[in-house]
Image (cartoon, grey):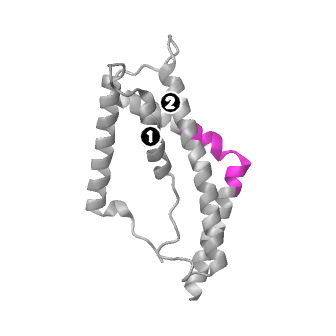
Amino acid sequence: MMQDNPFSNPDFVRRTLTAYSQQIAGLAAVFTAAGAPGVPGFDALRQPMIGAYQQLFTPAGPGPLDAATAAGAAFLRWQRASERQAALLGAIAQDAFARFLRALEASGPGAPPITSIAALHALWIDCGEAAWAEAAHREDFAEAQAELLAALAGVKSAASRR
């Protein structure tokens, strides 16, 4: 079963861009007001940013299948592999946010200059890419990725035999 590219759907693209621009506007508001009395600090950004990063790298599921329609063992294998991968992705997101905070707290001539929302966004991307690159080269990540792909193939194979 082949899934369509969601970016070919104009409604999906519109919703995605709207959500993205709302998140960037919220981020800009927090940074503009940072330090003002009664305004939450950078810690208020932790969950929204980590959640967005996790969602970005969450692998696709097996499609419209459940334990009753797929071979039970294959589905359960995929579910365990997916949970393991989600835990690793959560750790990457936490690492990305920790790197982001360290970069924001840095001062002096070596600190990244944050003079615009674009620079702030670029810093977040750099931190996420660094966290991802470090994790992607670890053996546990490679094993989890391989198991997830093998489990997904097993579920698809079981479903096609049905």
Residue name at image x 68 percent, y 45 percent: 137
Q: In this view, does 162 lie to the left or right of 48?
A: right
Residue name at image x 32 percent, y 19 percent: 36
Majority SS type along the magenta span: helix
Task: State the image quarter where residue 21 is shown.
Answer: top left
Examine the rendered structure and indicate whether residue 98 appears above or below residue 86. Answer: above
Q: Give residue 49's mark.
A: 1
Q: Position of residue 6 (x, y in %)?
A: 36, 63
In three-dimensional space, the C-alpha distance between marks 2 and 1, rounded to whole angstroms, equals: 10 Å
**Boundaries of the magenta span:** 129-143
Q: In front: 146, or 49? A: 49
Q: Where is residue 73 in the image (x, y as percent from the top left)?
A: 67, 77
* SS label for mark 2: helix
Task: State the image quarter where residue 14 is shown.
Answer: bottom left
Examine the rendered structure and indicate whether residue 120 appears above or below residue 64. Answer: above
Looking at numbered disc 2 in the image, what kind of residue is underneath it? Phe
Looking at the rendering, in which quadrant would you find the C terminus?
bottom right
Examine the rendered structure and indicate whether residue 133 appears above or below residue 71. Answer: above
**Circle 2 residue:** 100
- Mark 2 Cα within 10 Å, few/some/many (few <14, many 20+)? many
Looking at numbered disc 1 in the image, what kind of residue is underneath it? Met
Q: Give residue 129's mark.
A: none
Whether the residues at callouts 2 and 1 have beta carbons within 8 Å, the answer is yes
Residue name at image x 67 percent, y 57 percent: 144
Residue 21 in magenta?
Answer: no
Examine the rendered structure and indicate whether residue 106 appears above or below residue 24. Answer: above
- Mark 1 Cα within 10 Å, few/some/many (few <14, many 20+)? some
Residue name at image x 50 percent, y 27 percent: 101
